[in-house]
Amino acid sequence: MLEVTGLRVAYGGIQAVRGITFHVNQGEMVALIGANGAGKTSTLKALARLLNAAGGSVRYCGKEISRLEPHQLISEGIALVPEGRGVFPRMSIVENLLMGAYSRHDKDGIAADSAHVFSLFPRLKERSQQLAGTLSGGEQQMLAIGRALMSRPKLLLLDEPSMGLAPLMVQKIFEVIRTVADEGMTVLLVEQNAKLALEVSQRGYVMESGEITLTDEAAKLLANPKVREAYLGE
Ligand SMILES: Nc1ncnc2c1ncn2[C@@H]1O[C@H](COP(=O)(O)OP(=O)(O)OP(=O)(O)O)[C@@H](O)[C@H]1O
Ligand SMILES: [Mg+2]
């Protein structure tokens, strides 16, 4: 579904992503793990066209998408849940969800999808009129995921959904991510929490200093001594 070849991202003279190649098959959940500053967010931003890649190709469902505008990607079925969530703080939960559906005109579908989001995250339903800025970090993460789902994506890009959250909240959010994947969504999951990410994914890529240094089935990466030492704190 997603085929990335030789992707490069640079900030001025700094090469943040140095020609990486990876793919995500339809229906798969794939983890992209790596330490601080490895280039994970830069990769996702380039995929979502929030920044211009310095080189490489990105094919999605057989089509080159590396020159499309961000809103065109949403129409193509790609949604990003950004690092730091990016909810609209002065808008309510319901209004934030509707922003995720702004490119759609099918009222019934939108209503069905917000009902689905509320069934995934009952907590959001209870607080539906509350301003997003007053939500806890975990609730904002739920809302960010819910808002992305409102564009009815085929491919979901998640940037560090566990960041800054208490273990119980992380567990809840990952249960929902797993549910969404089980319903057929294709997911590219960026995480510093390697153990968590590999436990829910089928395959993984390890990124170090802008390069992919290792790839395998997630279970094999979890058992890999190098990964255990560098990313699982053993
Ligand atoms: N806007 C920017 N301007 C200049 N350099 C940047 C910018 N954004 C990121 N970088 C640099 O690019 C490199 C990769 O950063 P990136 O945010 O992609 O890493 P990351 O893997 O997402 O890290 P983290 O786990 O901390 O989120 C880092 O060296 C970072 O300092
Ligand atoms: Mg990041």
Image (cartoon, rainbow, N blue to C red):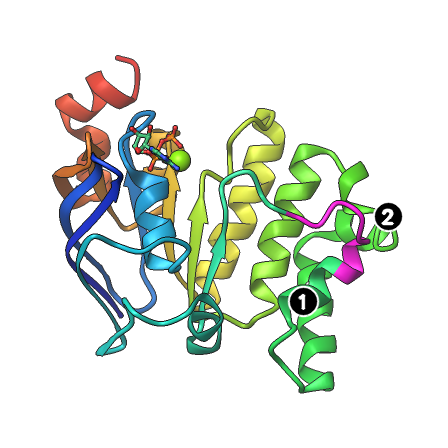
Is 230 above or below relative to 128? above
Q: Residues within 10 Å of mark 2 (few under 14, many from 20)?
A: some
- Residue 110 relative to residue 11: left or right: right
Looking at the picture, how far across and down is residue 52, in whole percent?
A: 31, 56
Q: Secondary structure at mark 1?
A: helix
Which mark is on residue 116? Answer: 1
Residue drawn at x 62%, y 33% is 169
Mark 2 residue CB less than 8 A from any atom of ligand 2: no
Looking at the picture, how far across and down is residue 204, in whole percent?
A: 24, 44
Q: Amino acid at mark 1?
A: His
Looking at the picture, how far across and down is residue 161, in whole percent?
A: 50, 40
Q: Secondary structure at mark 2?
A: loop
Q: Amino acid at mark 2?
A: Gln
Which mark is on residue 130? Answer: 2
Magenta residues, start to end? 87-95
Question: Residue most toward the right?
Answer: 129
Tell me which secondary structure the magenta stretch mostly adopts: loop
Please tell me in which quadrant of the rendered image residue 152 appears. Answer: bottom right
Whether residues under marks 1 and 2 lie with C-beta atoms below 8 angstroms apart, the answer is no
